[in-house]
Image: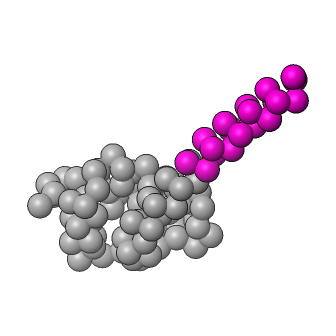
Amino acid sequence: MAERKDQMALLSKFEKHYQFKYNAKPNLNRWAEAWAADAIIDSFTLQKCYEMLDYYFDVYPSPSWKHFASQIDKMIEAKSRLEEDSIERQQLRKKARAWLSD
């Protein structure tokens, strides 16, 4: 079980992102949603959750805590595929440049 301060820190970071994006506080019951925060912190690290929260607010048009908590595993998978694709494309461009310069 994740520490209570970590759960509240994750929820607080979500609230700060939401306030920055919408200039309004999210409708969030911190005590009830602490269970979801606990589950995702146990499944992934707190640092990974912070990273995905930043990514979530960059990508999704209308973010909500429940959607984030239920979709974090899919976002991690999609982000890793995107990074792998970027590396593969970079290598292919490098090969293409070498082939064209010959």
Image quadrant for the C terminus? top right
Q: Position of residue 27 (x, y in %)?
A: 41, 76
x then y, percent, for residue 37: 27, 65
**What residue is shown at x 63% (from left), y 44% (from top)?**
88
Which residue lies at the image location 73% right of the left edge and 31% below the top edge?
A: 94
Q: Is residue 89 left or right of residue 69?
A: right
* Residue 91, magenta (yes or no): yes
- So how many labels did they put on this image? 0
Q: Is residue 22 left or right of residue 38?
A: right
Above/below status of 73 relative to 54: below
Comparing 68 with 17, the one in front is: 68
State the residue at coordinates (14%, 54%): 3
Q: Is residue 74 rendered magenta in the image?
A: no
Q: Is residue 38 above or below residue 96?
A: below
Instruction: Choose top left, top right, bottom left or bottom right for residue 68.
Output: bottom left
Quadrant (top left, top right, bottom left, bottom right) of the N terminus: bottom left
- Taking the image as drawn, is residue 88 in sight? yes
Viewer-proximal residue among 65 and 72: 72
Q: Which residues are magenta?
A: 84-102
The residue positioned 25% from the left and 61% from the top of the image is 43
x and y percentages locating residue 55 in the rendered image: 52, 55
Q: Main secondary structure of the magenta part?
A: helix
Residue 15 visible in this rendered orientation of the protein: no
Residue 71: image x %, image y %? 43, 71
Query: Left or right: where does residue 88 sit relative to residue 32?
Result: right
**Observer-nearest of 9 and 69:** 69
Residue 21 location, quadrant: bottom right
Indicate the colouring scheme: one colour
